Image: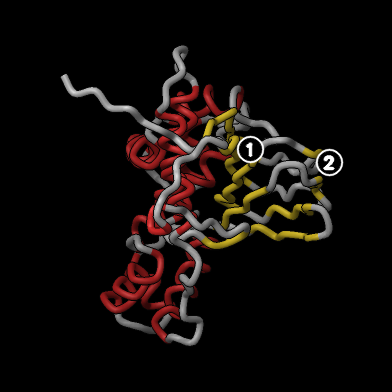
Amino acid sequence: MLELSIALPVKVQNGGLFISRGVGRHPARKLTSWEIIFVEKGTLTIQEENTVFEVNEGESLLLWPNRRHVGIEDFPADLKFYWLHFERENNQPDLPDASLLAIEQHCSVRDPQYVIALFRQFLSEQEKLQRSQALEIILLLILQQVSLSPGYEDKADDAGAAMAWKAKQLIRTQFHLPISTSQLAKELHCNADYLGRVFRRTFHLTLTEAIHRQRVRAAEKLLLNDAASLTEVANRCGFNDVGYFRQIFSKHTGLTPAVWKRRYCKEHINSG
């Protein structure tokens, strides 16, 4: 038998997923714990003491303990973010600098989809009746991803990156239409292989994956509406086949549309 002692520098309190209904704003409060926020969609505007942060899609924000923070704008209708409260353990051993995580308060993360997957894994683990140290380990993985971000920049003046951002914008606005890689390339007047290559280099996923992710995000929102049937949700998100919609939705969220609706509509929609 192998026995290991895991000395963790953090202790998790709780976490959740907030999905906006377009009303209200973040409450004013001062906590004794740290809070890490990651925005999957939309923009969260929040003030900590005298500093205002606009946290956009793919960005994280670290709120410090014993500092007052408050939402200064109403939640936009498309806002979706994950949050996690934790404490920093005081009895940490002395470690070499190479072992320390340097975490910026506000930054873009290098691999947003991996961070989203970690938060979803955290929420799934949190639901278990018996608490385990897996929560702290997942939190450390999230913080490690954020620590990789300083100095990471998309080259706005790079022609390939500029083309990739144009494609991303088209996907955001046309996901409900029957778009494809070749159609995007045609609209942007470039070669499909080239577009796919620069898009993957810039966003670390293929154009097809980006289209699917955008459609799944829209479906998650529509599933909160009890009046919408599964067929209607699929059609409004660009899927003309309900079976294929279920397949893609399950691939990207780990849940069927029905299970996602039951879980996130009732359990995790809160303000952090």
Q: Nearer the viewer, residue 24 or 208?
A: 24
Q: Is residue 130 above or below residue 4?
A: above
Which quadrant would residue 128 be assigned to in this image?
top left
* x and y percentages locating residue 253 in the rendered image: 41, 38
Which quadrant would residue 110 be assigned to in this image?
bottom left
Q: Of tags 2 and 1, which is closer to the observer?
A: 2
Q: Is residue 230 above or below residue 64?
A: above
Q: In the rendered image, is residue 118 in sight?
A: yes
Disc 1 marks which residue? 18
Left or right, residue 238 beside residue 225: left
Question: Which residue is drawn at the image coordinates 42% and 26% (left, top)?
Answer: 133
* x and y percentages locating residue 227 in the rendered image: 62, 28
* x and y percentages locating residue 245 in the rendered image: 38, 40
First along the sequence among labels 2 and 1: 1
Could you tell me the amino acid type at mark 2? Ala
Left or right, residue 201 beside residue 231: left
Q: CA distance from mark 2 to mark 1?
A: 16 Å
Question: Which residue is drawn at the image coordinates 46% and 80% (left, top)?
Answer: 155
Q: Nearer the viewer, residue 123 or 137?
A: 137
Q: Quadrant of the N terminus?
A: top left
